[in-house]
Amino acid sequence: MKISLSRENLLKVLQTVGGVVEKRQTMPILGNVLFHVYQNTLTVTASDLEIETRAQTELETCDVEQFAITLPAIKLINIVRSLPDGLTIVMDFEDARCTVSAGRSRFKLSTLPADDFPTIDLTQAELSFSLSQHQLKQLIQHSSFAMASQDVRFYLNGMLFDINNNQMRVVATDGHRLSTCTTELAMEGLEPTQAILPRKGVLELSKLIGDDDSLIQFSLAKNYLTVQFEETVFTCKLVDGRFPDFKRVIPTTNDQMVQTDRELLRSLLQRASILSNDKFKGIRLLLNNNLLAVNASNSEQDESHEDMAIDYAGPDMEIGFNVSYILDVLNSMNDDCVTVQLKDSNSSCLIETTSDVCHCQHVVMPMRL
């Protein structure tokens, strides 16, 4: 069996699926990618038993109508990446070996049978709808930073997808902050459905999403989510858990408004973070009559102080925050102006933003300093 294709096309599909492959595997087959050839089309699949990504490309030549085999993922990616542009790669499969030829280069790789490669059945979808890549990218970009990383509450190490009627909302929280974004869908009458996508799945999906208006198919089954692009299919098993009631966390009585230039505030907070505590990143904000003062200190007795003019007419207030949490929100925004909604020194703050496709709410709990 022999196939040939351009170096660029092969590298593109390998890089698309390669992020799923773990370097250390309990099963040798999971260190491989599945090559499936059918009618002059090559489908490359990678899996770690939780996430599966498939990418397609056209072949230049193929001497059989259909066959399947697996190849070592990392080795093959490194070989193809190291080859010069513009080459045609010929892959000859014979006796559990694959000879990869390009120009004057020859590489021989061991293969494993395709029958041993685990794949997910994609025919069990219970809910399907379309949205643009731009919509999905905005939702994830404006909320994923709030996901927990290694929390014992495993359901927080991921992102909630909440679908209801003609809206999709994503929610991420680590227990100290929460970010949620909502977008309108073209399809109405969708059954209320919730699904938690694990952290690695969110990060891998975000790499695949473009920023154009091309439509993608979004499907949910009982225990997995599938996102189908034009030439790529992403599938991920869902977290089996119950996400906390995020609506109870979003403040509804924050009536003290702080308005200022987003970039000026971001720069000030970045400077304050330099001398904040390395572990907790705490800073102290002092508000009074159109002035914001920001103080930071650490265990080495280093201190910083800086103030700036703001639009604030409320009572004097002193409140502490993790500066990294506020910076994450400001870095995700595109607005020139930011409005921070406060209640008192012991209550969380709320920052809301609205873009062309989504409405976002960011909640940050205060710190005691």
Image (cartoon, grey):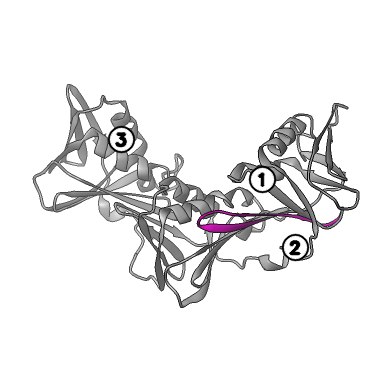
Q: Quadrant of residue 188?
A: bottom left
Percent x, y of residue 129: 40, 68
Name the mark on residue 261.
none
Q: CA distance from mark 1 to mark 3?
A: 48 Å
Q: Residue at x 42, y 49 (%)?
A: 209
Q: Which badge, 1 or 3, is on the more N-terminal residue?
A: 3
Task: Say which of 216 and 211 sits in front.
Answer: 211
Q: Residue at x 84, y 41 (%)?
A: 291
Q: Quadrant of residue 336?
A: top right
Q: Quadrant of residue 224?
A: bottom left
Membership of 5 in magenta stretch: no
Q: Residues within 10 Å of mark 1 (few under 14, many from 20)?
A: some
Can the viewer see residue 110 in this picture? no
Element type at marker 1?
strand
Percent x, y of residue 157: 60, 54
The boundaries of the magenta stretch are: 346-361
Task: Say which of 132 and 39 sits in front.
Answer: 132
Task: Please tell me whether residue 176 is drawn above or below residue 169 in the rendered image.
Answer: above
Q: Tag 1: residue type? A: Cys
Q: Which badge, 1 or 2, is on the more N-terminal residue?
A: 2
Per the picture, the main secondary structure of the magenta-coloured stretch is strand
Dot 1 corresponds to which residue? 337
Dot 2 corresponds to which residue? 251
Name the mark on residue 76.
3
Element type at marker 2?
loop
Q: CA distance from mark 2 to mark 3?
A: 51 Å
Percent x, y of residue 337: 66, 45
Can the viewer see residue 213 in this picture? yes
Q: Tag 2: residue type? A: Pro
Say if mark 2 contacts mark 3, CB within 8 Å: no
